[in-house]
Image: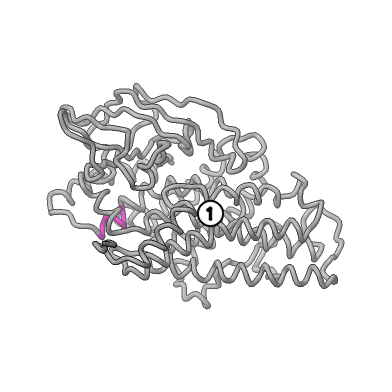
Amino acid sequence: MNAPASSLDGIVLDKPMFDPKAFRLNDEQVGLITKARELAQTNFAPRAAKWDREAIFPMENYRDMHKAGLLGISVPKANGGSGADYQTYSLAAAEIGRYCGATALTWNMHVCSTLWSGPLADDLDMDPQMRADHERRRAVHYKRILEDGAIYAQPFSEGGAAAAGGVAFGTEAKPVEGGWLVSGKKIFASLSGSADYYGVLCTEVAEGEKATRRNTLYLAISAKSEGVSVVGDWDPLGMRGTVSRTLIFKDVFVPEDSALMPRGVYFQAAMRWPHMFMTLSPTYMGLAQASYDFTVKYLRGEVPGMPPVKRRMYPTKQIAVAQMQVKLEQIKGIWFQAVTEARANPTKEQVLRAYAAQFTVMEGANELAALAIRTCGGQSMLKTLPLERIYRDSRCGALMLPWTAELCLDRIGREALYEPGEKDE
């Protein structure tokens, strides 16, 4: 922790969160994760306070990510991207979250458009024609991202049970010649007003039919389409740079080739690839590490811009750091195992572990931040230092659908005690 990993432009670079040898990462993974960490520490960390203070989207960070090739991290290699799998993306996102939570969280929304339509979709069942159509369509989206730096969002929540998988999405797509007319509303829509395309989950409902989750569509809607509007203010507790205002769609025409997944494939993914809903967690894994990093640097008198006053000699501080180290290793252990197990058709134990990992990260990140504030003392509350922002950002994770902390506990308890189809007489 204390010895520098290396230096870049005079900045002493932090060591990776997950040591490549200890966690058995290959050279290709290390290269992508290192690129994300170095870019985040050198470029994103100095800007993070601005995005938070002014509640504005970190567009400058996205330009940097485009230049570095990170917007296409999970675009398949055959399409010109880096081809990162779920585990590799998760580790890279955690490193970005370590330095700017809002950037990591919004980057997740963007990357999921390529992760879900790329390596995840490749694991699912499609007939030859459906797969060929999907390959052709996703290539268009990938080209926009790689060549133009197009940013994709993923508005999910609607204020009801749909985002938790309980009912069909209220945003509906009416089939018309050549595509669909989409109408509805998405709340907490990260990147609203900044994304070029919105990857909208909606329900295809033909005349006279009832809405069903099986008919969920995943459509890329251009932000410039007629009928798309962004409304409301954005002044939240944390994750202020995500700019998650409300999106309104009113009879927006969406052509067939804008589908990010073919008909029926999203529902198949939701049933067979549950780890797809865990991709918010890397951001909070990074925030957990950030709380620990700051505390150690503060107690050692190594926080940039502050007097080099050491506080490490006090037993109370040493015990607190020990508690933080234990908590951090627990979080990292279960989380790394869960993201490594992500695949189609996981076992019951793997799904339960994914829920447990999500809960542990989302609650643990804020617990670490709270302990860091208590340990570092009054100065840690100042907005000139990052810890109070880390604390506010970390509190938001447990609230986020589709796997809130409450839902994770509910599902763990139920699925641990019941096998599929079992009922109490």
In depth, the one of 138 and 291 nearer the eye is 291
Which residues are drawn in magenta?
118-123
Identify the residue at image location x=73%, y=65%.
296
In the rendered structure, the answer to whether residue 130 lies left or right of residue 276 reads left
Query: Which amino acid lies under the numbered mark 1 shown in the image of this protein?
Result: Thr
Residue 160 placement (x, y as % from top left): 39, 38
Identify the residue at image location x=56%, y=32%.
234
Report the colour scheme. one colour
Identify the residue at image location x=65%, y=44%.
47
Residue 139 placement (x, y as % from top left): 28, 46
Q: How many marks?
A: 1
| In the depicted structure, whether residue 250 falls above or below residue 290 | above
Say whether residue 54 is visible.
Answer: yes
In the rendered structure, the answer to whether residue 80 lies left or right of residue 379 reads left
In depth, the one of 55 and 46 nearer the eye is 55
In the rendered structure, the answer to whether residue 358 lies left or right of residue 268 reads right
Q: Which residue is mark 1?
A: 283
In the rendered structure, the answer to whether residue 113 lies left or right of residue 243 reads left
